[in-house]
Amino acid sequence: MLDLTWMVMVAYLIGSISGSLVLGRLRGIDIRLMGSGNAGGTNAFRSVGWLFALLVVMIDVGKGVVAAGLVPRLPMLFSAEAAFSGPALAGACGLAAVIGHVWPVFFGFRGGKGAGTAVGVVAVVAPWCIAPLVLVWVITVLGTGYVGLATVLAGFSLVPAMWLLAPQTPVPPSLGALAVALAGLLLFTHRGNLARLRVGTENRFDKIRVFKRKP
């Protein structure tokens, strides 16, 4: 049990390394004081620019990959056999990293919304879910211009994709639980976006919309 605890804690600490906040400090800015106030890639793009946002997304996705793909292998470096392994351990470490991104211990527990880190985790533990996730996100953004809505719907797509598209069955219950947990967490972190969407005040990328209502 101790090995599971320390690996999950390491994954959480990795998740707490917020790309936008680390890069922002190097530039002398706090992204949480700009734009929407969120420490994520979308606000980074709107407030600072595409290059800054790209670096932020790369860091956030990368820490999800490290947490789910490398942290579970750490016992091998010490010639130790972990009591927990496989999808359950990778999923637990991955979820801990996403939680660390949302509530980072290094930045007063005020982080981003977890989407980028979640993508990195999914790419490791369930790569067959990446295509439908990206497809749902792109279609929604191009159709509506709402990034928050697109992220929530993409998160929901994880749940059916986890079972329906898996190359091998049965799917480990731990992966099913991870899909539900990530979808629920993304819904929670984007609740403000959905509330603004209901009242018509949500930010929209009109320039990238393909289908626009004619005046």
Image (tube, helix red, strand yellow):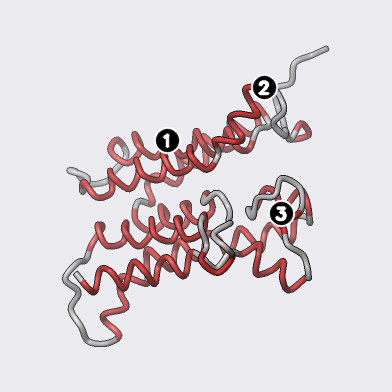
Q: Amino acid at mark 3?
A: Ala
Residue bearing the label numbered 3 = 44
Quarter of the picture containing the N terminus is: bottom left
Residue bearing the label numbered 2 = 199
CA distance separating discs 3 and 2: 24 Å
Q: Amino acid at mark 1?
A: Ser
Kindly check if marks 1 and 2 are in contact, taking CB atoms under 8 A apart as contact.
no
Residue at horizontal 32 percent and vertical 41 percent from the top: 162
Q: Amino acid at mark 2?
A: Val
- Outermost residue toward the bottom? 78
Residue at horizontal 48 percent and vertical 37 percent from the top: 187
Residue 109 position in % (x across, y down): 54, 59
Residue 40 position in % (x across, y down): 63, 53
In this picture, residue 44 sits left or right of residue 181 = right
Residue at horizontal 59 percent and vertical 62 percent from the top: 58
Q: Which mark is residue 100?
A: none
Residue bearing the label numbered 1 = 157
Residue at horizontal 52 percent and vertical 54 percent from the top: 102
